[in-house]
Image (cartoon, coloured by chain):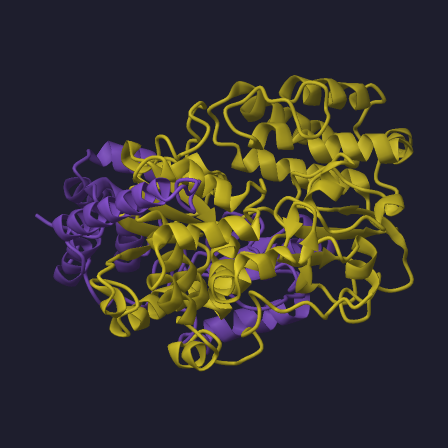
Amino acid sequence: MAITDAPKIITSRVGYDDSFTLERYLATGGYEGLRKALAMTPEAVAAEVDAASLLGRGGAGFPAGRKWSMMRKNPVTYLAINGDESEPATFKDHLLIERDPHQILEGVLISAYALQVSQAFIYLRGEFALGLERLQSALNEAYAYRAVGANIFDSGFSLDIVVHPGAGAYICGEETAMLESLEGKRGFPRIKPPYFPAAIGLYGEPTVVNNVETMSNIPWIILNGGAAFAALGAGRSTGTRLFALAGHVRKPGAYELEMVKTTFRDLIYAPVLGGGIRGSNTLKAFIPGGVSAPWFGPDKVDLPLGQDEVGNEGSMLGSGSVVVMDSATCMVRAAWRITKFFSNESCGQCTPCREGSGWLERILYRIENGSGREEDLDLLMDLSDNISPGLHWPPQQTTICVLGPSIPSSIASGIRMFRDEFLVHVKEGGCPFD
Amino acid sequence: MSHLNADMRARAGELVALYPEPRSALIPLCHLAQEQDGWLTPEAMEDIGDLCGVTAAEVRGTASFYDMLHTEPVGTYVIAVCTNIACLLGGALELLEHAESALGMRVGGTTPDGVFTLHEAECLADCDQTVCVQVNHRYVGAQSPETFDALLDDLRAGRREADIPPHGTLVRVRRSVPLEAGRAEIAAERKAMAQAQAQRAAAARASGGDGGATS
């Protein structure tokens, strides 16, 4: 398998030291996609993105073109870009923001033209201090270059973009919570329906919300055509994707790979990618798409990196982050820390999530620290079932947003795959890995 | 009486003007207040409320939701040690324990001299650099107990002042221009384009097309 033969669609510049500057961007084809798009009709630009079958890169994997076409029936008012990357072990948007901010801006401009929005906002995670500075600098440069603002490149199309900082809240990555936050409020997800901000978004106006990585793909799609993008990958998973590999591998990092044509085994073991498990340990389990996703064991390592391919096996490709856990990993501790995260980040609106996450965290903590009881395993599963009935994936929901139903993923995976390990903690009165 | 100084007032005005509704500037204004004072003071919340058209209580109610907005004083350097899954696998709990003993306090505390505050952080999105640590939201690279002690020394000696400003200063790059396209101009542009699109669609229908490339 030729892992590295596919074109680098979104990471072509990251190797340059000055990849974030306008000078480098222009020297490497920057803003050519925007010039081309402005010479096309908005509907033709949208048609190219439709033809690319680009799935949104935020986590849910909704087709970007379809999101847009829902909008084209009504006039769109706002475009809001989600750069609140916070799903644990996900660090691909962080790279794109710091290393190639102009590419994001160009994607936003092309999308705003296709959708004819009146203003665009880029909501960046507050903890990205350098990313905020890089993106604001790039925006200042782009205004001076006349790629943003009034009468862009003398085309008669005008658009203003605002870079907006968050302030530390995982939940603001949920699109309706992000809009609430952008309105200056607590990041409380909105009650659905309406399911999409397309109907009622920012200030109650029709709004498209897209992810940073999704935007980064747009300039290439316009320059090379939607068909060229759709020719990469397979099935519904077209193009390339930036995978963030973390955990017990020799070479953790963000790798842009052609969808479906690469497997988890390639990503974890190939010398040019993860380089294998650290030390002399073996693979125990991996999380295929952010900590909201159910875990996989080594038997699933030959699955392709594709949305449906992973979805059909009961988990998700999600945010594109892969966490590798080796044979020395305590699965109770891993599940406890992930659950503690959800407990910290629950916004508090819905009882099953707010209370349930704390109960689950405390039960896992006592098992890990030697005060667990055998019946705690059933209690964990029962509580989890109250948050997400049936404990399957995609999950049933008892809450306003999907944070709640994501909590049981690691717990149910841990108990189903490593029940004996949980029981050893109880019987021995502590963690066998300590 | 304004608590924010004249420069901050000017910048606050610029921020409010970027949004269709002034309340949208609430979080950016909280960051601005933290840049002036290091934390979000009750007086600053009054000012922000005035600027956004809400009460100071609403500002506090919103700010208290967000981890980065501090309604009590914090140290000059807020050290955030990630212990989430990738860093946990890389020894984060051990590093956090080391940080506590090196600073002589528990997580959440501030040193008596007001220099350091220690936080346990959720994932900071730099997971190939474990254990991931930020100081005032600036990445300082993968940390181990040994490098952490050197980092504290550097911070104490002022050797990191160029890349790590005091707590509260989040973005050192100021937006260079206000909004360029006025609302009336944008509305006129969009209306003209909508009419052109409708004409193209009608022409396509008349010539037996399927109603245009968008459907």
Quarter of the image containing the N terminus of chain A? Answer: bottom right
Query: Which quadrant of the view contains residue A137?
Result: bottom left
From the viewer's perspective, is A119 left or right of A33? left
User: B190 or A390, which is in the foreground?
Assistant: B190
User: A134 or A395, which is in the foreground?
Assistant: A395
Residue A103, position as x, y percentages in the image: 45, 66
Residue A433, position as x, y percentages in the image: 86, 46
Above or below: residue A304 compared with residue B170: above
> Which chain is in purple here?
B
Query: Which quadrant of the view contains residue A264?
Result: bottom right
Q: Residue at x 26, y 45 (%)?
A: B199
Asked if one can make out residue A172 in the rendered structure from this viewpoint, the answer is no
Q: Residue furthest front?
A: B207
Above or below: residue A85 compared with residue A5: above
Residue A389, position as x, y percentages in the image: 68, 18
From the viewer's perspective, is A259 left or right of B185? right
Q: Residue at x 52, y 29 (%)?
A: A401
How many marks on residues? 0
Q: Residue at x 30, y 49 (%)?
A: A116
From the viewer's perspective, is A183 left or right of B146? left
Chain A appears what colour? Answer: yellow
Above or below: residue A166 compared with residue A183: below
Residue B212, position as x, y percentages in the image: 40, 44
User: B135 or A201, which is in the foreground?
Assistant: A201
Q: Residue at x 77, y 53 (%)?
A: A324
Asked if one can make out residue A163 in the rendered structure from this viewpoint, the answer is yes
